[in-house]
Amino acid sequence: MSRTNISSDLRATLRDWIVAGQIEPGSRLNEVHLSKELDVSRTPLREALCGLVNEKFVLEVPRRGFFVAPLSVEEIEQLYVIRQILDPAALRKAGLPDEATLGQLKKLNTKIAGAKRAKRIIDLDDEWHLTLVAGCNNEVLLDLIRQHMIRTRRYELAYMSQAKNVSVVTDEHVQIIDALEQRKLSLACKHLEQNMSTAVGPLIDWVRSQQQPEANE
């Protein structure tokens, strides 16, 4: 396997660990320990870490090394406001879905409502949103949505761990589907924009609660 492929695989593995919370926000990424744990040399590992710096999952601090990027209110506000723009824009380009797609959206929403684990819920929710905009013919726009899904996943794990939040999400999905069934694309886009903003307030409160002990020390 080429060094490029090794670096890419390492980046995906480390990203998964960060997203899943296996490496806590703010933690130092010890290159020596990681290279032993992952059984790789330092060169592709460093390339992977630099890639994660570009993706904003990791921070590089001069003379100190690499650290997992902390969760922040600013990142929540910036990420979700972009999704409020991207997803409705993709839906407008996709246009009104056919009956088969509407049926698929309903089935996925039922699965979301019945899922128990936050990771499974997020996987299904991402699939729901990508199915919704699958008819969009702008691949760059769809790639941006996928990238932002990865960036928001650390926050979504916290949000979707609460059953009441999952109920809010599925109810909002129903509103979007209903508008599409009524052939009201603009209304569906309006509901979708709302869906992209619902998590912001609760997530900001959650991040601040995580930071509170630090502030009291």
Image (tube, grey):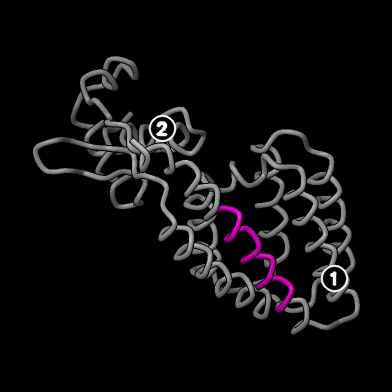
What is the three-letter code of the residue carrying label 1?
Asp
**Looking at the rendering, which quadrant does residue 36 occupy?**
top left
Category of crowding for the residue at label 1, using alpha-carbon neighbours closer than 10 angstroms: few (below 14), some (14–19), many (at least 20) = few
The residue under label 2 is 24
For the stretch drawn in magenta, what is the main secondary structure? Answer: helix
**Residue 213 percent location from the top left of the image:** 42, 37
Front in this rendered view, residue 189 or 28? 28
**Residue 179 percent location from the top left of the image:** 85, 76
The residue under label 1 is 98
Front in this rendered view, residue 38 or 179? 179
Q: Secondary structure at mark 2?
A: loop
Residue located at (56% from left, 53% from top): 203
Q: Secondary structure at mark 1?
A: loop
Q: Indicate the quadrant containing the C terminus: top left, top right, bottom left or bottom right.
A: top left
Return the mark for residue 182: none
Residue located at (71% from left, 46% from top): 124
**Residue 212 percent location from the top left of the image:** 43, 43
For this orientation, the residue located farthest to the left is 63
Q: Indicate the quadrant containing the N terminus: top left, top right, bottom left or bottom right.
A: top left
Residue located at (61% from left, 54% from top): 202
Residue located at (74% from left, 84% from top): 186
Start-end of magenta stretch: 190-203
Front in this rendered view, residue 158 or 134? 158
What is the three-letter code of the residue carrying label 2?
Glu
